[in-house]
Structure formats: C-alpha cells, structure tokens
C-alpha cells in the first residue's frame, strides 16, 4: 500500500471509530490557527501525513493538493511557474497547511 493510501486509510478508520463511539473530532493540520475562535473540543485528528500535490496544470491554472500539504510547499511550486494562489491564506506559522 502506498504511503498516501495508508495515511488516508488511517484517517478514514479514525473517523469511523469516532463516529461509532460518538467521539467528537477536531480536524487539525499544522495547528497554526488553534488560538483563533472558540475553545477547541474533541480528539485531535492530525491530517499532516496526508500531504502532497496531486496534480498541477500551470497552463490551466489548476492545482490539486492534499489537506496536509504545507502552504509553503504549495506556494513554492506555484512560484516556479510565476503563479500564486488567488487569495492570501493566513500564515500563522511555518507549519501552516492547506487544510488548516
């Protein structure tokens, strides 16, 4: 099994187990925005292992990235083609990920 398939399987299994046990989950990437908003509840479901750029078509201006992909990695790949994101996601630390 490939690393990303394994990481996805772990996430799916964790979600199913939490649903069966009625345990709330707190989906978390880099955790750089944990300070923002209401108090956080639930067991942490870390998504950083599910990372990487799945596809990138510079001429089409389309990129697909997994939730755990660091924003810095995504922005670096785009910059190689003279591109950037169409918005400015908050960077509250070097661990910021696509999924938060």
Image: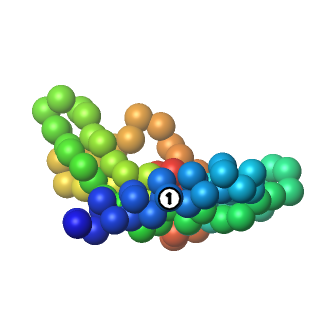
Residue 69 place in picture, x, y as percent: 39, 59
Of all residues, the one furthest to the front in this rendering is 20
Of all residues, the one furthest to the top in this rendering is 60
Say which element carries label 1: helix
25 or 16: nearer the viewer: 16
Q: Tell me if 20 is positioned left or right of 47 in this view.
A: right
Location of residue 73 (image quadrant): bottom left
Residue 10 place in picture, x, y as percent: 45, 63
Q: Are there few (<14), some (14-19), or many (20+) residues within 10 Å of tag 1?
A: few
Q: Is residue 58 above or below residue 94?
A: above
Residue behind mark 1: 13
Q: Tell me if 59 is positioned left or right of 100 in this view.
A: left
34 or 60: nearer the viewer: 34
- Kindly identify the residue that appears in the image at 23 percent across and 66 percent down: 1
Of all residues, the one furthest to the right in this rendering is 39
- Kindly identify the residue that appears in the image at 72 percent across and 56 percent down: 21
- Kindly identify the residue that appears in the image at 20 percent across and 54 percent down: 80
Location of residue 74 (image quadrant): bottom left
Q: Tell me if 82 is positioned left or right of 26 in this view.
A: left
- Kindly identify the residue that appears in the image at 21 percent across and 45 percent down: 55
Q: Is residue 6 visible in this depiction of the protein?
A: yes
42 or 89: nearer the viewer: 42
């Amino acid at each position: 099994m490939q690393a990303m398939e394994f990481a996805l399987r772990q996430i799916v299994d964790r979600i199913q187990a939490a649903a069966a046990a009625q345990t709330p989950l707190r989906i978390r990437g880099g955790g750089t925005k944990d300070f923002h908003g209401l108090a956080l509840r639930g067991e942490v479901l870390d998504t950083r292992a599910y990372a990487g750029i799945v596809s990138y078509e510079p001429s089409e201006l389309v990129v697909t990235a997994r939730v755990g992909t660091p924003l810095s990695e995504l922005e670096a790949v785009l910059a190689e083609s003279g591109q950037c994101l169409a918005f400015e996601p908050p960077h509250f630390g070097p661990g910021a990920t696509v999924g938060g």
